Image (cartoon, rainbow, N blue to C red):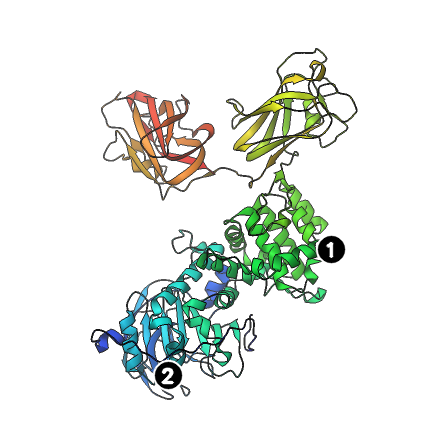
Amino acid sequence: MFATSAILATTLFEPIMTNNLAVHAETAQTATQLEQREFDLPGTGSFSDEAKREKRGEQKNYMPTGIYVKPNEQVTITVSGTQKIRAIIGTHQYDKEWGKEIDLSPGSNTISSPNGGVLGLDNFQSTGTVKVQVTQGGSPIPFFELGKHTKEDWVAMMNKYPDAYAVQLKSERAVLTVTRDSANKYIVNQDPVPLLNKYDEMIREQDKISGLSETEPNPLHRSTRRIWAFVENPNAQSWGMYAGLDGAVFTTAGEAIKSTLNVNEFGWGQMHEAGHARQQYPWTWWEDTTGGIGMVDVTVNLYSLAAYKKVYPNKPTRLETEGDYTRAFAYLKQTNKDYTRLQDHFVKLVMLWQLHLAYGDEFYPNLHKLYREIPEDQLPKTDEDKIQAFIYNTSKIAKQNVLPFFDQWGLKATQETRQKVEALNNPTLIAPIWEATDAKSVKPLAVLSKKIMKASANSEEATGSASKAIDGKTDTFWHSSWTSNQYPYNLTLELGDTRTISQLAYLPRQDGSENGRILTYNIYTSVDGVKYDKISSGTWENNSNKKNAIFDPVTAKYVKVEVTNGKNGFASAAEVDILTDSPSVKPYVLPKNTMKASANSEESSGSASKAIDGKTDTFWHSSWTPNQYPYNLTLELDKNQTISKVDYLPRQDGSENGRILGYSIYTSVDGIKFEKASSGTWGNNSDKKTATFNPVTAKYVKIEVTNGQNGFASAAEVDIWGY
């Protein structure tokens, strides 16, 4: 549940009783090991700016110190450097009152609070690190840091401070503020390490489905450096779990806090409440006007499910164990469905999860990225606008026209949205992915749009041109010329874009005539329209029913149907459809910041790395001893990739030296055995050149130079195109 002040219950857990501390430190601990008064605070950005960047709700959290400040006690804090930071005394929800926030200037600061509480610090600047010292005031409480403290340290802390005001536990990504009694009662074997590791695992998986990463080079999609807060509320009189500005909150009453601290019961409660802080507001609509329950407690559980599957990979999801799929399928059988009026959170969740099941682990990360990249003033604001944008944007990310899916679920697209989706020219979904469950996958089979296709044939009648096979009309057809038995007849479709395809559907002419029904065939594909590879062959029966040829997925821009036998010596087709069971793939330039380059010949000022440094005014150059062919430039990718094209940019300084004229391109998965993918010649000029070849999986790409201007080889930049 999500709340700002009220406590909203979602799940009930059975209480458990444990003994007080029975484990004692095996080694003597010093005060400096258990207490901390100096802190290095890296800039983490403000909580509001981070929320705006990620297009999500705010969570106001602070770095813990493990120091308690009594009411009206004066605390002196010294801040190094030139940046202001912020302190807070008190933890809302743990305390009855709001914490007191105080800006700290460089130098010495003396602060206090009438209510007292645990001291927190916040370097809300975007950059830099500030050193902070608490030089006077405050008392230590048990404060366990993952990676710094041990189980024995924890036991020593708990024994040293039996009357501690609170207890804090910090992992890399989370901070827990709880009562000493609850920590004593619920932390299994009094070892916080497994528990804190679970929190980090959960948070990183929720990062992942959000399209965020700690190592992402683009700061827009980088995980926040702010810490996520989990707080016990010892003041509430009834059980509750909820999320708000203060973090994820769990009451002492009813032992809601139990699963927060007991690693063996860690699960949906923490994942759900943490997930509320992840929800992107541009696609979380309320639906108040339609009587629906809205999406606030629906989209949140995408993050719950993702984390649950990561933490418990061998357990079924609650969609399976709680009958959610069963109720969803009953809803889907209804007529006049309206998704916005659905009252069942988990039935609504099934629809969202089926998009993940159909389109894979990258679907929701890419959707989050898309919304983050939209300027704030262009985001949808009303519920209806959010719904229509969601339908359109999911089609963009799936790279399929998913209108049939939303039609089945009763999430209604306007005519304007339908036109926008259809204008994307993506394959149209035809597989019933709305029947999918975690245990039963349904591949998202879709038919490619024929609006951007072109058709040609080596034989056609004037009234039966090749274009009739892709005009979408079953009462027209392509027909070979009336000179019979001129085999093979070829019908070639240019798809418009490079696609990953897996089926061809053939509809014979529907006018009652047998003439030209295709009986035996071969299917070829190509990425360049020059070199074709056979991917399928077979026979079809002599009737007017639609036929299919199914083959392993292959990337292609051209598909050729070769007719080796047709009824009465002719060939004809009312319609030919190309289908895919994976999202349409367009090649893109692979990032070069993770590549490595080497060469069998290079000048000290023209190393191989210059060919992938992203700068057109630097270049790789072979040694000044000419005609030492072949020259090899080898790029190592960060992992195996499907690639289909190499771009070569000659040096751009006006010199002809080393322009590659004759080349071969080799690929390898292990760096040992290389296979030729392409060869050819390039013109002697400074324009960018391209070598296109059939898609191949490779980790290593080698350009072998067999002829270069003036006996040398050089390259300003080399780009690899992959999928």
x and y, in percent, of residue 351 in the image: 62, 55
Q: Dot 2 lies on which element? A: loop
**Number of the label disc, if any, that sits on residue 167:** none
Gap in angstroms between the C-alphas marked 2 and 1: 56 Å
Q: Residue at x 41, y 78 (%)?
A: 182
Q: What amino acid type should be assigned to the residue bearing mark 2?
A: Tyr
Q: What amino acid type should be assigned to the residue bearing mark 1?
A: Gln
Q: Quadrant of the N terminus?
A: bottom right
Q: Crowding at label 1, few (<14), some or many (≥20) Cα neighbours within 10 Å?
A: few
Q: Is residue 61 visible?
A: no
Nearest to the observer: residue 163 or residue 527: 163
Q: Residue at x 73, y 55 (%)?
A: 334
Nearest to the observer: residue 654 or residue 540: 540
x and y, in percent, of residue 615 in the image: 36, 39
Name the residue carrying label 2: 165
x and y, in percent, of residue 503 in the image: 60, 33
Nearest to the observer: residue 697 or residue 289: 697
Name the residue carrying label 1: 334
Image check: 24 left or right of 172? Answer: left
Q: Dot 1 lies on which element? A: loop
